Image (cartoon, rainbow, N blue to C red):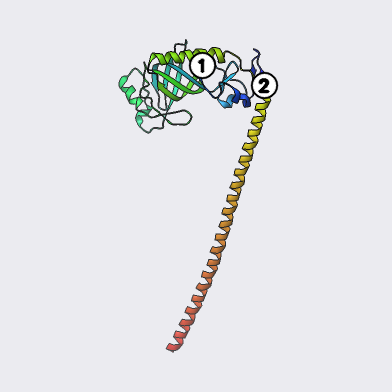
Amino acid sequence: MATVDDGELVFYPAFCFRASPTHFAWVKMGAVDVHLLKRRGGFEDQSTFFYMNHPIRFVSLVGIIVARTEYPTLTILTVDDSSGATIDVIVLKAPITDDDGDQSVRSGKRGDLQSACATKHVAATNKTTVDTTALVPGVVAQVKGTLSMFRATMQIQLERVSVVQDTNAEMRFLDQRSRYLVEVLSVPWSLTEEEVERLRYEADDEEERLEEEQERIKRRQRRRIEREEKDQRRIQKLWEREERLRAKEALHSRDAGAKFMRDFGERKV
């Protein structure tokens, strides 16, 4: 059921999130607003944070890269989007075996930075390759990612990135970000009781279909196992019958050989 906090914001159950304008969207936000996102009890396992009562998992922001720090398993891009705060964007590295990967590289060393850019980076969720060659201090980029928290500080786990080519594109994003903040994020998310009940019914129906599908999969697996066991028993029986025939033939051959030797001995006498 929905819960109400001290500020009278209504927090709806997770099955209502499909109706949220923010939960399945790349939410355009400023870094200062990302740092305002909060976790809420009951949703810790869903990587969901809240702005007011809006559930948010994915964010998008545009800013200038002011620092790039290399570590053995990840790269940290510090982005300043002129919102009043900076934010760290975490870019995961693909596993490497080169001993040079154990050396941290700071963005102030151009040669080392070029070498670090050659390291293969991957997206946080689907592990597809991410090209970070152009992501150096001074470059304006649009980053999209999921949310995480490290030492009580919000971070973005990079999923997609692109370089912003001109000021007009940057200003268009800032305008869209401002409009979204005013028109969506600053207005509490609200559902009627009828909408909540409909979403509950849809969630229950989807759960039943999922359970039925899982049961069908289990039945198919059981039938496959039964067929394999039946085939194994049939093969075992055939092998045992062939073994008996081979044993009988071997016994017959020994008897025939013994008889031949007796007959041969009698002829010699």
Answer with left or right where residue 3 lies relative to residue 104.
Answer: right
Q: Position of residue 59 (x, y in %)?
A: 50, 20
Q: Which mark is residue 2?
A: 2
Q: Is residue 201 above or below residue 63?
A: below
Answer with left or right where residue 56 lies relative to residue 200.
Answer: left
Residue ID at (48%, 21%): 156
- Amino acid type indicated by mark 1: Val
Q: Earlier in the sequence, mark 2 or mark 1?
A: 2
Residue ID at (49%, 15%): 176
Q: Which mark is residue 34?
A: 1
Q: Position of residue 114 (x, y in %)?
A: 32, 23
- Amino acid type indicated by mark 2: Ala
35, 16: nearer the viewer: 16
Answer with left or right where residue 72 lies relative to residue 225.
Answer: left
Work out which quarter of the rendered image holds the C terminus and state it.
bottom left
Q: Is residue 89 above or below residue 263?
A: above
Answer with left or right where residue 244 lies relative to residue 103.
Answer: right
